[in-house]
Image (tube, rainbow, N blue to C red):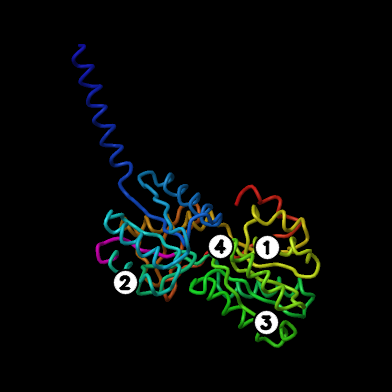
Amino acid sequence: MKRIISLAVASAAIFASVASAQAQDVRIAMLVKNLGNGFFDAANKGGQEAADELGNVELIFTAPTAPTAEGQIEIINNLIAQNVDAIVISANDPTALIPATQRAMARGITVISFDSGIAQEGRQMQLNPSNNELIGVKQIQMASDAAGGSGEIAILSATAQATNQNIWIDEMRKELANANRSSLNLVDVVFGDDQSDKSYQEALGLFARFPDLKVIIAPTTVGIAAAAQAVRDEDLVGKVFVTGLGLPSEMAGHVDSGAVESFAIWNPIDLGYTATYAAFQIAQGNATAEPGDSIPVGRMGTLSIGDTGEAAMAEPFTYDASNVNDFKDIF
Ligand code: RAM
């Protein structure tokens, strides 16, 4: 009797170890622009949620320290050597990563981009947080509201190569070309490289060069927080307003200070969740990402793949003094 019990215990132990080996058998790497950015920490949280829900996924969160294509290429090469199942990338350059991601795809690794895209030939799909035109128009509308409809505005962006910011800047320029926006004058576009210090210095440079500046639009969560801090430190609250894309957790104090009247963003947790979920579906052969395809993505519903292999999520949400404090503990 004793022997039978110990055999049963031993086989349970073997079964448990086989089950745990199976339990982690899909490895998905989330490779973001750089470390230390709260936006990507929130995306990682969503990715982890998807991994836990799917049950047999290990999510590897990784990034270079600075947001460069070179740093990401080195990591992609390492991920190929580790033979991960999928790579989900927010790219620091639309084209520079293509040879590396094509090598990954040739080895059977699923590659999708999200947030900041890779050109079509370098990935299987791109997940946009929202409609790009909407993101551009929204930011010009917020800037116009802060400027009272006219005056000098400047853009403080992330890196000069960032796919997503460059698309949004193009959309902003298109919106500014409309006759009803002709009283807004875009005086400069500068780059803070998604580094707080550099973004802060670039904001100071704008104040010095453009004494009549009314608004800084920062289409980056790092840039908007740094620019708002610079406005406060230079006692420019009420003279220069900051708007753009920010995280409620990082912007609530700046809204309270008056440096920021409104800003927008989508939910980065949902974005990371959806990107990870979609990568799993493609890697497992449950879905494909050809134009016209649909990919089920758990609690976020279904993604519809458009002509260029892109899918878009929800509209950006606007935050101001009336609601920013309700969201500051979430992301
Ligand atoms: C920064 C990054 C990211 C962008 C957000 C809005 O965190 O540049 O790519 O989507 O801002």
User: Is 93 left, or right, of 228 in this rendering?
Assistant: left
Q: What is the CA distance from the residue labelled 4 to the residue labelled 1?
A: 24 Å
Callout 3 amino acid: Val
Disc 1 and disc 2 in contact, CB within 8 angstroms: no
Q: Which residue is mark 3?
A: 187
Q: Disc number at residue 318?
A: 1
Label 4: state its secondary structure: loop
- Of marks 4 and 2, the one in the foreground: 4
Indicate yes or no: mark 2 CB to ligand 1 under 8 Å. no
Q: Quadrant of ligand 1?
A: bottom right
Q: What is the CA distance from the residue labelled 4 to the residue labelled 2?
A: 27 Å
Q: Give the image location of residue 137, x and y in percent.
A: 64, 75
Mark 3 neighbour class, 10 Å CA radius: few under 14, some 14 to 19, many 20 or more: some
- Of marks 4 and 1, the one in the foreground: 4
Q: What is the CA distance from the residue labelled 1 to the residue labelled 3?
A: 25 Å
Mark 2 neighbour class, 10 Å CA radius: few under 14, some 14 to 19, many 20 or more: few
Magenta residue check for 106: yes
Mark 4 neighbour class, 10 Å CA radius: few under 14, some 14 to 19, many 20 or more: some
Disc 4 and disc 3 in contact, CB within 8 angstroms: no
Q: Which residue is mark 4?
A: 195
Label 3: state its secondary structure: strand
- Of marks 4 and 3, the one in the foreground: 4
66 or 92, which is in the foreground?
Answer: 66
Magenta residue check for 67: no
Residue occupying the point 58% across, 68% down: 192
Give the image quarter of residue 103: bottom left
Callout 4 amino acid: Gln
236 or 77, which is in the foreground?
Answer: 236
Q: Give the image location of residue 165, x and y in percent.
A: 54, 72
Q: Give the image location of residue 47, x and y in percent.
A: 46, 52
Callout 2 amino acid: Pro
The boundaries of the magenta stretch are 105-113
